[in-house]
Image (cartoon, rainbow, N blue to C red):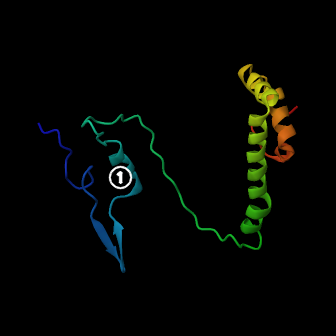
Amino acid sequence: ASDKPSTTEGKVGQPPKAVQSGDSALPAASVEDRLASSDAKIDKKGTKADEATPSMVISVSRISIDDPLLQHRQNWHNIVLPHLQSWTQAVYRVRKDDDKRYRLLTAVITENLQDAWGMLFEECPWLRSCDTSYHRD
């Protein structure tokens, strides 16, 4: 028995045949076929990878960042970037202040989420209006 992976159609080591559709070439294998063949991957040592490893499918959708209704570009510049800057500045403030850093670490270690979130809300007040997993009373 050979340790090499099979080189037949749809197996690891050989790309699928292409089907001509108009002027573009489309792979013959479906997404399900490709995911099934990914379960049989061989690692660098030549052993079969764990079949229980979860697969991930990523979907990509085109959007217009200048959509008049959703205003992605405007929201990026007016909301997302300022909040990222505020978060980064808060991280540096907490790192610089030993009292804040130890209070936050102690709250997290002792699982006192109310104090930990309270500190985060003090540093970044805009977090109060965000949809977080923190359960407010």
Which image quadrant for residue 115? top right
Q: Secondary structure at mark 1?
A: helix
Which image quadrant for residue 30? bottom left
Going 31% across and 42% down the picture, which residue do you hit?
40
Q: Is residue 1 left or right of 76 when viewed as pictured?
A: left
Q: Is residue 67 left or right of 18 when viewed as pictured?
A: right
Q: Taking 78 as reference, is 123 above or below it?
A: above
Going 74% across and 35% down the picture, which residue do you hit?
95
**Circle 1 residue:** 33
Going 28% across and 41% down the picture, which residue do you hit?
42
| Amino acid tagged 1 | Asp
Going 85% across and 33% down the picture, which residue do you hit?
118
Residue at the limit of the structure toward the top, as seen here: 110
Quadrant containing the N terminus in the rendered view: top left
Q: Is residue 52 left or right of 121 when viewed as pictured?
A: left
Q: Dot 1: within a 10 Å radius of its alpha carbon, few (fewer than 14), some, or many (20 or more) residues?
A: few
Residue 123 vs residue 47, the one in the foreground: 123
The image shows residue 132 at horizontal and vertical percentages of 76, 41
Q: Taking 50 as reference, is 12 above or below it?
A: below
The image shows residue 99 at horizontal and vertical percentages of 81, 27
The image shows residue 133 at horizontal and vertical percentages of 74, 37
